[in-house]
Amino acid sequence: MTESAALPPTPSGNGRIDAHASTGSFAWALRSDPGTVREHNEDFGGAWHDADDRGPFFVVADGLGGHAAGEVASRLAVEAALAEWSAPGQPAAPQAAIRGAVRKANLAVFDAALEQAKRGMGTTIVAATLAGREAVVAHVGDSRAYLVHEDRCTQLTTDHSRVAEMMRMKLITPEQAATHPARSMLTRSLGGEPMVQVDVGRHPVEHGDMLVLCSDGVWDLVSRTELVDAAQLVPRAGADRVVELALKRGAPDNATVLLVAITSPEPVPAASGRRSLFGRRRG
């Protein structure tokens, strides 16, 4: 039996989230914790895979810390993206569908931010779907996606932040970026404008690979080597391990991770069922 998940909040923002499920093709687990310093969890996440006419959908959002109603923004974004992905009708091709889901999330946050009490709120987002032998990933902001293949962990997204721009221009080193005062300044997020540029990428995946979607409260504290180690476990145990590592290291921010393990050599049917997507393999 499959299930979708976007759990109800607790009085502490979006509270602690612990959800998981599996199908014949993949298994996933979501874990989110407020951390040891912040009172409210401004992260949120969810997954959907209840129908055979479109691919699965996984999403993590991180409400902007220090802004109005960050926990509301992340929840709105995830719920809007899930609703758009699962809406009745003929599904679009994966890249168009995931871009449309993220744009719908942006509109939901933008519209809500027009209210006086929520003015200025925003969120990052990272989302993924499985399409044949590919993962299609979309993101806005600095929530990240990684792919663990064998003993390698590769970052699939590029942060939309001032520090990332300076690194791309070779103005600072990765070591300097880790402590730079502008490290939390985003150049792109959901909710600020009615339209947002969404980065979408296609990445080959194979049986045994694991996708990692996470907020900066995880990638800032947990190394890629540790993500590879977590990928050797079943997703629920792996997600627990990742968040527990963040908590042991002080977790000054909310910590959220969503792991997706490819458990079958067969291609995962994609949204719109375009068979041409099934043939691409890693070289």
Image (spheres, helix red, strand yellow):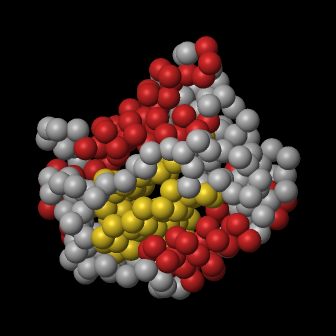
Q: As displayed, is residue 118 above or below residue 11?
A: above
Q: As displayed, is residue 227 above or below residue 16?
A: below
> Can see residue 70?
yes
Residue 267 in picture, x, y percent from top left: 22, 71
Count of marks, rendered view: 0
Q: As displayed, is residue 4 above or below residue 230?
A: above
Residue 35 located left or right of residue 206? right
In this view, the residue in front, 146 or 202, is 146
Residue 209 in picture, x, y percent from top left: 41, 77
Find the residue positioned furthest to the front: 11
Quadrant for the N terminus in the image = bottom left
Q: Residue at x 47, y 51 (%)?
A: 45
Q: Residue at x 54, y 34 (%)?
A: 73
Q: Residue at x 43, y 49 (%)?
A: 7
> Can see residue 227?
no
Q: Residue at x 48, y 61 (%)?
A: 18
Residue 197 in picture, x, y percent from top left: 49, 35
Quadrant for the C terminus in the image = bottom left
Q: Answer with the quarter of the image where residue 27 lies.
A: bottom left
Q: Answer with the quarter of the image where residue 261 lies.
A: bottom left
In this view, the residue in front, 8 or 121, is 8
Residue 117 in picture, x, y percent from top left: 62, 18
Q: Answer with the quarter of the image where residue 28 lies.
A: bottom left
